[in-house]
Amino acid sequence: VENPPHILMRTTMGDITIELYWKHAPKTCKNFAELARKKYYNNTIFHRIIAGFMVQGGDPTGTGRGGKSIYGDTFADELHKDLKHTGAGIMSMANSGPDTNGSQFFMTLAPTPHLDQKHAIFGRVSKGLGILNRMGSIQTDEDDRPTEEIKILDMIVL
């Protein structure tokens, strides 16, 4: 499927299905879908969890400083005024400033309006919100790293 509508993310805590927003963020969706297809995310950890805020993953180094896009190291933000971080389950790109998207993403655990127009939203959790909420309650250290490893086992393009 050229533009798969969903991706199944199988994790050590359970399955999460992601609906992709191709109409609003085609380049960002393509990046995520292609990395999933190439098994780039397989066996990577969720390296940063902040309760009531977000769960972050997608870095093959597990440090929060790694990961490349399918377009090269980074690519430009696709910010859409109609897409907002309105609640739990929003899929958005992690970045280190404008136009620095690579492979890292986060899933929101609550409304985060301060991230609107700063992070590219490319989808939402359509199934498995309970799993995401459980991830969000995992104990973390002073650097927001989970004390118990949570991994993406694999991703299946649906």
Image (cartoon, helix red, strand yellow):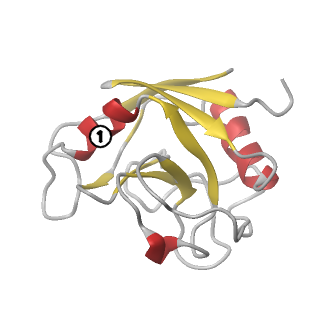
Q: Secondary structure at mark 1?
A: helix
Q: Closer to the camera, 118 or 104?
A: 118
Q: Evaluate whether residue 108 shows in this view.
A: yes
Task: Give how far across and how far down residue 58 sits, in percent.
Answer: 50, 46
Task: Give how far across and how far down residue 101 sits, in percent.
Answer: 63, 63
* Quadrant of res 151: top left
Q: Is residue 130 left or right of residue 141?
A: right
Q: Is residue 154 above or below residue 92?
A: above
Which residue is found at the position 56% from the left and 79% from the top?
A: 97
Q: Give the total number of marks visible in the rendering.
A: 1
Q: Residues within 10 Å of mark 1 (few under 14, many from 20)?
A: many
Q: Is residue 18 above or below residue 13?
A: below
Which residue is found at the position 51% from the left and 24% from the top?
A: 154
Q: Is residue 40 left or right of residue 112?
A: right
* Quadrant of res 120: bottom right
Which residue is found at the position 20% from the left and 64% from the top?
A: 143
Task: Give how far across and how far down residue 119 sits, in percent.
Answer: 57, 68
Which residue extends farthest right?
A: 2
Q: Is residue 70 above or below residue 10?
A: below
Q: Which residue is mark 1?
A: 133
Q: Is residue 72 above or below residue 4?
A: below
